[in-house]
């Protein structure tokens, strides 16, 4: 039990001994971690890692362990007590199947059949609603649907995973992308408040004509600072995972915003807002920016624009520890409310078509937190959002 995990840690350079493995097994037997991958991760790290410098090696070995679906039999055996196994398996059967099992020998026969199914899981399983595999409605595996599942490897399909135990690298948005249409720029121009700033390097035609006339026809050039859009904007982009299909439109928006707003700063987040953000995806694991610092640095008149599909597990919004990538001591909802209380105007742009919003619970939750200020990333949606920010 857990031998493959133990040797995986050793192979990754984590100096774990048999003593640490026995401590982990004792913790599992005491139900310190029960049917919760997050609990198992915390327990395993406490037991197996005695120096924080090995945390990164542990995380990599942990991710490899859970990417190998066949190795999960050890965890299942450790985390599922017999009485829970019996109750849960009964849920998988129809009344007709229960009657058939009773006729074959009762609950003991049922458990024996269930163990056979687990043994069959050593090979790839696709579809269904039982245990580990791809597709289907199982709470474990990937590419299927379960409202409170744990994605293990693979690619998210329904954006409902509670935890994702692998480090993913995202790339920065490219602000040099040429727009395929001028629509985004035109929509952003609804948010304008011009002021002259900088060096006096723009010809003031009216003043030049007046000054030349007063100077008996001798040319008297008058220069003024260039007029710029004085609106100040903070852009927050959701990157990675379910946002990958929307990269192009986000890059177009980013490019347009860079040309329209002289005072603009941007940050990245993943799925929802927590205690920190980042401005470079290359350095997002090492150089985070505290959200409190952002709220203290920029004045309340900055216009805040979030760009994201708002498609995630509801836990990521309302629960401490709900983030799929790190432990957040406070719920994301709390951080979003703090930000909205700090700045005068905040909107959320959603690339998901509005007709699909009702199919994803988290979109409705985010829209409610935003007090209705969520807009689709269409020409009309952008214009409405900019009109609201300009009030």
Image (tube, rainbow, N blue to C red):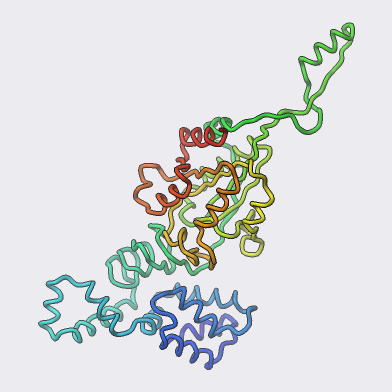
Relative to 10, is 129 on the left or the right? Answer: left
Q: Observer-nearest residue: 336 or 205?
A: 336
Q: Name the quadrant containing residue 280.
A: bottom right
> Residue 353, image x and y in percent?
40, 42
Task: Report the number of discs.
Answer: 0
Furthest toward the front, the residue is: 341
The answer to whether one can see residue 280 in this image is: yes
Q: Is residue 3 above or below residue 156?
A: below
> Residue 274, image x and y in percent?
55, 59
Q: Is residue 267 above or below residue 66?
A: above
Q: Name the quadrant containing residue 79.
A: bottom left
Q: Determine the residue positioned at 42% across, 87% down.
A: 30
Relative to 47, is 217 on the left or the right? Answer: right
Q: Is residue 110 above or below residue 222?
A: below
Q: Determine the residue positioned at 45% across, 90% down.
A: 26
Q: Observer-nearest residue: 80 or 104?
A: 80
> Residue 84, image x and y in percent?
30, 80
Q: Determine the residue positioned at 51% across, 56% down.
A: 272
Q: Name the quadrant containing residue 223.
A: top right
For the C terminus, which image quadrant? top right
Relative to 97, is 168 on the left or the right? Answer: right
The answer to whether one can see residue 181 in this image is: no
Q: Observer-nearest residue: 370 or 237?
A: 370
Furthest toward the top, the residue is: 216
For the N terminus, which image quadrant? bottom left
């Amino acid at each position: 039990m857990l031998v493959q995990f133990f040797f995986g840690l050793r192979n990754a350079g984590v100096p774990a001994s048999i003593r640490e493995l026995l401590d982990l097994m004792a913790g599992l037997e005491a139900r310190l971690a029960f049917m919760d991958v997050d609990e198992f991760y915390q327990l395993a790290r406490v037991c197996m890692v005695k120096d924080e410098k090995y945390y990164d090696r542990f995380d990599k070995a942990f991710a490899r362990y859970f990417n190998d679906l066949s190795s999960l039999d050890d965890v299942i055996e450790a985390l599922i007590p017999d009485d829970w196994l019996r109750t849960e398996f009964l849920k998988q059967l129809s009344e007709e199947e229960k009657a058939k099992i009773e006729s074959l020998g009762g609950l003991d026969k049922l458990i024996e059949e269930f163990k056979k199914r687990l043994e069959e899981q050593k090979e790839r399983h696709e579809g269904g609603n039982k245990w580990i595999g791809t597709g289907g409605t199982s709470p474990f595996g990937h590419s299927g649907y379960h409202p409170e599942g744990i994605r293990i490897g693979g690619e998210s399909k329904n954006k409902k995973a509670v935890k994702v135990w692998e480090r993913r690298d995202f790339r920065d948005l490219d602000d040099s992308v040429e727009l395929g249409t001028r629509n985004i720029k035109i929509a952003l121009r609804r948010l304008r408040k011009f002021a002259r700033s900088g060096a006096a390097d723009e010809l003031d035609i009216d003043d030049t004509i007046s000054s030349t006339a007063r100077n008996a026809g001798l040319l008297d050039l008058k220069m003024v600072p260039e007029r710029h859009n004085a609106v100040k904007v903070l852009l927050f982009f959701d990157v990675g995972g379910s946002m990958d299909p929307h990269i192009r439109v986000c890059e177009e928006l980013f490019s347009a915003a860079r040309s329209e707003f002289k005072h603009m700063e941007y940050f990245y987040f993943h799925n929802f807002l927590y205690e920190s953000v980042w401005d470079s995806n290359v350095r997002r694991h090492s150089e985070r920016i505290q959200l409190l610092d952002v709220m203290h640095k920029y004045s309340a008149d900055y216009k805040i624009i979030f760009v994201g599909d708002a498609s995630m597990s509801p836990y990521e919004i309302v629960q401490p520890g709900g983030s799929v990538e790190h432990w957040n001591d406070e719920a994301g909802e709390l951080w979003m409310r703090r930000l909205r209380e700090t700045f005068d105007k905040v909107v959320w742009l959603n690339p998901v078509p509005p007709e699909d919003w009702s199919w994803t619970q988290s979109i409705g939750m985010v829209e409610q937190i935003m007090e209705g200020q969520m807009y689709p990333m269409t020409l009309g949606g952008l214009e409405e959002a900019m009109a609201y920010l300009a009030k």
